[in-house]
Amino acid sequence: MTGLDAGGEQPTVDLPLVHRGKVRDVYDAGEGRLLLVASDRMSAFDVVMAEPVPDKGRILTGISNFWFDQLADIAPNHLISSSIADFPEGARHPGLEGRSVLCHRAEMLPIECIVRGYLSGSAWKEYRTSGTVHGMAMPAGLRDSERFPEPIFTPSIKAAVGDHDENISFDQAVDLVGAEVAEAARAMSLALYARGAELAAQRGIIIADTKFELGFVAGRLLVADEVLTPDSSRFWPADEWSPGTTPPAFDKQPLRDWLDGLDWDKDPPPPPLPPEVVAATRARYVEAYERLTGRPFE
């Protein structure tokens, strides 16, 4: 069963389950293909909430599919089809429409391909301590949320479930995947970010940083999983950005803020979410979809 709709029907996927993540369920679709189903599950502080956020899976899938189309000339991707008519017979339930994709099964790189255009998050914490970002020396005097002169590639190691990913240097990435693959991953990630950031800027959104998942299919490096979504990126409204402050994000910030105000140790089980927090979080995701794609979310 896939935990899809808040309080609604849960379509059965009659395919072997390969992996169940915090948000996505991955099924073996045969013939070197996978079916990715984005649920409405919501996680914060690495804990999955009991209450889903309605339509979140469809929003994330719609944004990724938009970017796969926009960035196809920059890098190939894993997408085969997002139409349930093309899915295997065991996955043609109407409830999967809009939140599921049939894709090539890639041999994924063991690194997260992160690109940062602005100093924020874990990079800001490291910079305040050592003046570096992923071990790279940065100019003195940078402020929180300040734009880098050029976007930088800052890989990380995929961590075990429940742990935060570990930032690594480019040299460490070379040790893991080899110089040729690391350089190709860096070039592809920077090119994807540059195009995405340019388009988002036209829609009034700053992409402060983002994470790409890359892998090989038939010897060709391509982008997989999700692309430039609120779950994999830090989106800021351009008109509210100012170096030295942290702009509000188009993501689960209402949820994080509410949880931060509680006496909760960030360990399961999570506290029950009030309907207004769920609604505010959904509204952020919908706004991100509509501003990026230029389409109403239906």
Image (tube, helix red, strand yellow):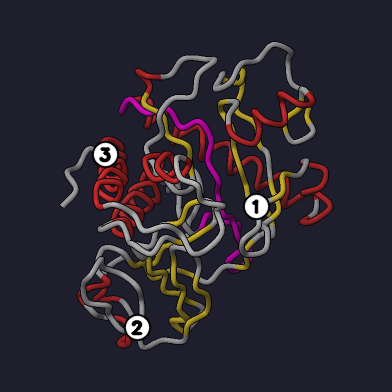
Label 1 or label 2, whichever comes before in sequence order: 2
Vertical relation: 268 (above or below) 143: below
The residue under label 3 is: 287
Place residue 283 in its image quadrant. Answer: top left
Mark 3: amino acid: Glu
> What's the distance in space between the residues labelled 3 and 2, CA to CA?
30 Å
The image's mark for residue 13 is 2
Mark 2: secondary structure: loop
Q: Which residue is mark 1?
A: 164
Image quarter of the N terminus: bottom left
Mark 3 and mark 1 lie on one chain; the one further toward the N terminus is 1
Q: Amino acid at mark 1?
A: His
Residue at the front extreme? 263
Q: Residue at 54% across / 56% down in the picture? A: 46
Give the amino acid at mark 2. Val
Instruction: Say which element carries label 3.
Output: helix
Q: Are marks 3 and 2 in contact (CB under 8 Å)?
A: no
* Residue found at the very far top of the displayed protein: 141
Q: Residue at x 52, y 15 (%)?
A: 243
Q: Position of residue 8 (x, y in %)?
A: 21, 72
Q: Is residue 279 above or below residue 15?
A: above
Count residues near mark 3 (Cα–Cα under 10 Å), then give few for <14, some for 14-19, many for 20+: some
Q: Mark 1 or mark 2, which is nearer to you?
A: 1
Q: Which range of residues does the magenta coloring cover?
A: 203-224
Image position of 46 with respect to 257: above or below = below
In the image, residue 222 lies in the stretch drawn in magenta: yes
| Residue 51 drawn at (x, y percent) | 33, 62
Query: Looking at the image, which residue is at 63% across and 40% down?
Result: 187
Q: Mark on residue 241?
A: none
Displayed quadrant of residue 14: bottom left
Label 1's element? loop
Label 1 to label 2: alpha-carbon separation: 30 Å
